[in-house]
Image (spheres, helix red, strand yellow):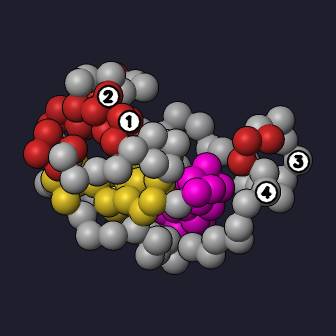
Amino acid sequence: MYAPVLLGAEVVLNRTLLQSLENRPAVYEFSRIEGVEQYPAGCSATCYIGSSIQFCKRMQHYLGGRAQTNSLRCAIHNGVMVRWRYIEHCRVAEAKMIHSFIRHYGERPRHNRVTPALPDETCSRTAIQGGPKITV
């Protein structure tokens, strides 16, 4: 089952929230405020899973309209909830959360462009190799 137990309570992503965020590594999840996304194996409000070494700065970019894709920019503009966890090895946590989501719903979250390799897979993305074991 996809269980983002690593993350805290959901809050609306807005400029007021930025005042309470820290600029340190974090993994985060965006969910639709209204409605759900249809996936092959069910429905979920989750539309994006990400990570950032500088979490507060990343959220500032999103609120400034600088998301990676037009679809993610549109989702943020329409309003999303965010929950996160500060964690040193955020890329590893992100990869594990996305793979857990895929196992549960049949595909990656709607606005994620790529599926990162898991740390124990052979890949060229050495930045996510190593780190602590995270169970999701």
**4 vs 3, front mark:** 4
Q: How crowded is mark 1: few (under 14 residues within 10 Å), some or many (20 or more)?
A: some
Q: Which amino acid does label 3 sit on?
A: Thr
Q: Is mark 1 on a helix, strand or loop?
A: helix
Q: Which of marks 4 and 2 is nearer the N terminus?
A: 2
Q: Can residue 26 be seen in this view?
A: yes
Q: Which of marks 4 and 3 is nearer the N terminus?
A: 3
Distance CA(mark 4)–CA(mark 3): 12 Å
Distance CA(mark 4)–CA(mark 1): 23 Å
Q: What element carries label 2?
A: helix
Q: Do the residues labelled 1 and 3 touch (CB within 8 Å)?
A: no
Q: Residues within 10 Å of mark 2 (few under 14, many from 20)?
A: few
Main secondary structure type of the part rendered in magenta? helix
Q: What residue type is labelled 4?
A: Gly
Q: Name the residue: 36% across, 35% down.
A: 57
Residue 62, horizontal then vertical, whole percent: 30, 32
Q: Which amino acid does label 2 sit on?
A: His
Distance CA(mark 1)–CA(mark 2): 5 Å
Mark 2 sits on what residue? 61
Q: Give the range drawn in magenta.
A: 88-106
Q: Is residue 90 left or right of residue 34?
A: right
**1 vs 3, front mark:** 1
Mark 3 sits on what residue? 122
Q: Are marks 1 and 2 in contact (CB under 8 Å)?
A: yes
Distance CA(mark 1)–CA(mark 3): 28 Å
Q: How crowded is mark 4: few (under 14 residues within 10 Å), some or many (20 or more)?
A: few
- Is residue 44 within the magenta segment? no
Mark 1 sits on what residue? 58
Mark 4 sits on what residue? 130
Q: Do the residues labelled 4 and 2 touch (CB within 8 Å)?
A: no
